[in-house]
Amino acid sequence: MGLYVLMRLISVVPVLLGVSILVFLLMHLAPGDVTSTLLGPMASPDARAAIRERLGLDLSLFTQYWTWLTLVLQGDLGVSWVHRHEVADLVLPKFFNTVILASAAALIAYLVGFFAGFVAASRAYSLSDRILMGVMLILGNTPLYWLGLILVFLFALTWRWLPATGMVSVVDGGGVLDVLRHLILPATASALPSAALVARVTRASYLEILNQNYIRAARSRGVPRGLILRKHALRNAAPAILTVGGMELGYLLGGVVFTEVIFAWPGAGNQLYSSIVGRDIPTVQGIVLLIALAFVLINLIVDVVNAYVDPRTRTALSGY
Amino acid sequence: MSLVAVSFIFLVVLLCLLAPYISPHDPFEAVARRNTAPLTGNVFLGADVDGRDILTRLLWGGRISLITGVIPTVLATAVSLLIGMSAGYVGGWFDQLLMRSLDIFFAFPLVLVAIVVAGVLTPGLFTVMIAIFIALIPYIARLVRTTTLSVKTQPFIEAARASGARESVIIFRYLLPNTVAPVTVYATTLIGMMMVLGSALSFLGLGVQPPTADWGLMISEGRTVLRRAPHATIFPGIMIVLVALAFGFIGDGLRDAMDPRLRSR
């Protein structure tokens, strides 16, 4: 197990190196002259030359990458082109808000998804199974941003139960309860499409396992049905559910861009969006790098947990 | 169910193709008062924030949505077949090099790749397609490679080689057909998801630009008058859900047809 974790950690290094190259290249892939973005189209050639020198754009690509990487490894993500702030100072607090939103969404997605899948599997092929899975199927194909708007329309505009935007109230805001109230709608909107997939996988893996001989044996020994579902079957259904759960966490991290924009949640996704629109490349680079790092870390944790739960997967180092 | 889905998609494609002839109004012109409710006057599904007929714009917008779902997925599948099959068939360091490079893309959520690619390029229909195309390749290529690896070791390939079949015959006559089947199933399911993603990019303003009629863009325009005219947001969303669902059903149907062993009980 220790060896597995070590090998898996080592396998992350080349991936992160590749990630850093791609993120670095973002600066150069963007069409148009960087100096025009910074100084406007009317800038004098002298000013352009000065800014090119300051950013090191005249150096070789490799030198630029090396300088950038050294700084990034020291926690220096550069200076935002729009806000005149250190990117790290700008992005880290927002990333924390995103983590709050994504964790809440993940919690809802797993609880709802697992419960729905469990109930559907234990009443397989009944009417309630069909209705439940039908609803999940529709949710799974619903655009996240549209679902968010529908929730806003119902719960914030029509019934006025919950706030539609922001993270804290303008007046007397900031308490834990206040944040929770603001969290409900965006977290639910992000969670439901993922919950649908978790439910499908939970149901499918349960049904597959309930057909196996050792379950039949347990049943014939007179083990209560509830115990079989909760203990015997869960052990073997867990790896598939965990894997899809981990994948969904990554999907949630990408999807929060939409929920954050719709609900004006002050997170990294929202910042990424406004930085893209404002052509603030260093900030875009910083956020993409952070999300990729989080994503790689999540996958790592999922693999390790999986290896712990299901020793058979330990040999499959690369994930294929 | 998948037959219903196929008929539905066929109907949607037909209606969208015929949009210039059957749509009741001009998609860009105001024909009613702003935010007119459905079933009033000359607008069956109501009018949007600029007084344009929503039914007309749904018909025209379907063209863009179908294009953003189908074209990048088909192209990405073609490129992925090339990458995945050559990696799986040649093997060795070549395989390692290709697959490790694709691994880097798996470090980003798919949606993020699409958003960043679309965001860096100039907004437009072409950009949406490029963004989806790039984001998809790693996923399909990985499936192609895995399938190629498992097909490659099967006895009938060995038999072909033993009977002196040429390399090209083995690849195109034996390997390709057996690889295409599962990939087609996967790609069909992806079409619906990519249509959703494409509309999402346009919703963010990174894709198709106004005044083009596009389902994602219509939702984004409806959002500004969500309280007064919810229908402007609701109808395009329902269309996206229905079409995405239909492609999902077709994918399931194809899977059952191609491999009866997997038939969902």
Image (spheres, coloured by chain):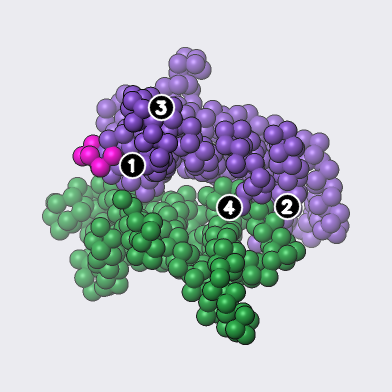
Q: Residue B200's x, y, as percent?
A: 44, 51
Q: Which residue is mark 1?
A: A136
Tell me the amino acid under the disc marked 2. Answer: Gly
Tell me the amino acid under the disc marked 3. Answer: Arg
Q: Which residue is mark 2?
A: A18
Q: Which residues are magenta?
A: A124-128
Could you tell me how many numbered marks the image carries?
4
Q: Residues within 10 Å of mark 4 (few under 14, many from 20)?
A: many
Numbered disc 1: secondary structure: helix
Q: Residues within 10 Å of mark 2 (few under 14, many from 20)?
A: some
> Relative to A81, is B120 above or below?
below
Image-based side of B57 in relation to A187, left or right:
left
**Residues at discs 2 and 1 in contact (Cβ within 8 Å):** no
Image-based side of B206 in relation to A317, left or right:
left
Image-based side of A317 in relation to A57, left or right:
left
**Is residue B155 visible to us here?**
yes
Q: Using the numbered discs, state the Cα–Cα distance from disc 1 to disc 3 in whole angstroms.
A: 22 Å
**Is residue B125 visible to us here?**
no
Numbered disc 2: secondary structure: helix
Q: Is residue A13 magenta?
A: no
Identify the image quadrant of the N terminus of chain A: top right
Q: Residue B178's x, y, as percent?
A: 49, 70
Predominant secondary structure in magenta?
A: loop
Q: Using the numbered discs, state the Cα–Cα distance from disc 4 to disc 2 in whole angstroms.
A: 14 Å
Q: Which residue is mark 4?
A: B113
Which mark is in front, 3 or 4? Answer: 3
Q: Using the numbered discs, state the Cα–Cα distance from disc 2 to disc 1 in whole angstroms.
A: 37 Å
Q: Chain of mark 3?
A: A
Tell me the amino acid under the disc marked 1. Answer: Met
Closer to us: B60 or B28: B60
Colour assignment, chain A: purple
Colour assignment, chain B: green
